[in-house]
Image: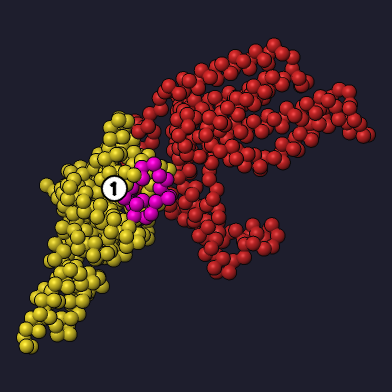
Amino acid sequence: MAFLEVKQVRFSYDAQTADAREVLHGVDLEIEEGEFVALLGHNGCGKSTMAKLFNGMLLPTAGKVLVGGLDTSLEENQLPVRKQVGLVLQNPDNQLVAGIVEEDVAFGPENLGVPPVEIRRRVDEALKAVEMYEYREHAPHKLSGGQKQRVAIAGIIAMETKCIVLDEPTAMLDPKGRGEVMGTIQKLNREKGITIVLITHYMDEAVQAGRVVVMDEGDILTSGTPRQVFQQVEFLKRHSLDVPQAAELVYRLGASGVKLPEIPLNEEECVAMLRRYLAGRAGALS
Amino acid sequence: MIADITLGQFFPGHSMLHKTDPRVKICLIIFHIVLIFTAGNFFSLGLVVLFTFLGMCVSKVPLKLYVKGLKPILFIVVFTAVLNIFYGTGEPLVQWGWLKITGNGILNALFVSVRIVLLIFTSSVLTFTTSPNQLTDAIERLLKPLSKLHVPVHEFAMMMTIALRFVPLLLEETDKIMSAQKARGADMESGGILQRIKALIPVLIPLFVSAFRRAYDLATAMESRCYHGGEGRTKMRVLKLGKQDVFILGAVALFLGAFLLLNLWLPPAILR
């Protein structure tokens, strides 16, 4: 049994009213413990709704979401589910509660009724894990976007959840902040074995995941390793989805007659591939 | 420009008063204010002045800052002093028609102005040495007994914490919206009061809309982090009375003894 199970989930906002619109049409998804999954899709495809379904902030209109075997739709499972699945939102300013970094990180464990000495230990550890320990006594509004988002992540780590769902955590950050946050996420997944569900529309972030799930119009379009998914440039483009820039370049070269053996995922691979290709050409010419 | 306003005017430092338990500080400050207003003769007033001054020195906050805090109140001090001079009872020293100045009036004016100044200094000692978060924390703990009477103490404290957290954010946002509206040709600096208030409407409406959006996000984040009210909640920071708290309490006890002695044994200098 997978850690996160989404079974035939349908979801509509305002389900009771006449103008209900369904945003998810029977989604099936399984995520194993320790996985790093990127959920891709363009705006309005239902990926943010998925994020809130994972920890029971929203409940499916039909179907089931199971977290470690617990049904999120049952009232008594609400807290146990949220103890296992933490949620990080897009806007770093709106999700910090307290006026001091370390007190904000302590907010989650305080809610869980953890003894004070243990909270202190968890807070210090969480802040060190996101490399924000030196800033523990700062006010959040004096930090940069990337730093704030890392504090928000530390707030979830301190609760010792098994899984962190991040809903476009880098959308409001500059490239530097984006790099910091992605580095932190990678590290948590590798070193602490925390399950990561990263919702994003940046292709170069999705490439870093172990598995990519592409959503379109309330359904899962395709999924697989980044390499498998981004090979299908044509297919993704038909659904007006982007591909990483390197993949795009090689795809276009292919269209104009320069055939490379496969689609690269990042700049380095692309450069290496082009270099090999050019060397081959030079060899053929001389 | 707006972001310069610092709420509570906390002045971070490591003095003895900074380390004192905020609950102790709140109680002592209230107690001290009562003493300031019961000091009836020059000796007890002098003692209160001395003690306030001592507190200001121990706080290690530059005296300049205290004086700065006095400026906006200066008008009130002068105003009440002048009123008191003319409202004294007893034999007039000088008299123009119905206006008269008596010795008692002058004394009254002196006492009132000294008291107001001391009041400002004393409360500044509290706000300068205690962070807003510590203050909320202390208030929550001091009011805890009230929760037995179903007063939502925890909820109030949580609201205060969140409000303090969002003050700088909303100020920053107001600044941004004002610039945005100015860039669109809004005029906020000319015209009469009425016109200026009207000019604020296009600032306030977007501010409110965004505040509601923030509140919705914040609620999601708080619930995701298992917030379910004050029940079964623990605190990372536990307030405990330490050595310096006992020391300060001792100093205050001595002060109180001296104060009572002076205030009761010596005759009052002003009539009430």
Residue at 55 percent of width and 65 percent of height: B181
| Percent of width and height locating residue A209 | 18, 58
The residue that appears at 64% across and 62% down in the rendered structure is B189
Given residues A256 and B126, the one toward you in this image is B126
B36 w.r.t. A40: above or below: above
Where residue A144 appears, x then y in whole percent? 38, 54
Q: Chain of mark 1?
A: A
Instruction: Name the residue: 62% across, 34% down.
Output: B120
- Which residue sits at x=80%, y=28%? B106
Residue A227 image-quadrant placement: bottom left
The residue tagged 1 is A131
Magenta region includes residue A148: yes
Q: Report x, y in % for residue A79.
A: 28, 39
Where, by quadrant of the figure, is residue B238 drawn? top left
Q: Is residue B27 left or right of residue B224?
A: right
Figure colour of chain B: red
Give the image location of residue B83, x and y in percent: 79, 34
Give the residue type at disc 1.
Glu
Q: Is residue B6 magenta?
A: no
Q: Which residues are magenta?
A: A135-155
Q: How is the image coloured?
A: by chain
In the rendered image, the residue lying farthest to the top is B265
Mostly what secondary structure, the magenta segment?
helix
Residue B205 visible in this rendered orientation of the protein: no
Q: Residue furthest bottom?
A: A285
- Residue A169 relative to residue A64: left or right: right
- Secondary-structure class at tag 1: loop
Give the camera-side residue of A286 and A213: A286
A173 vs A24, nearest the viewer = A173
Furthest residue toward right = B97
- Report the chain shown in yellow: A
Vertical comparison of B94 with A150: above or below: above
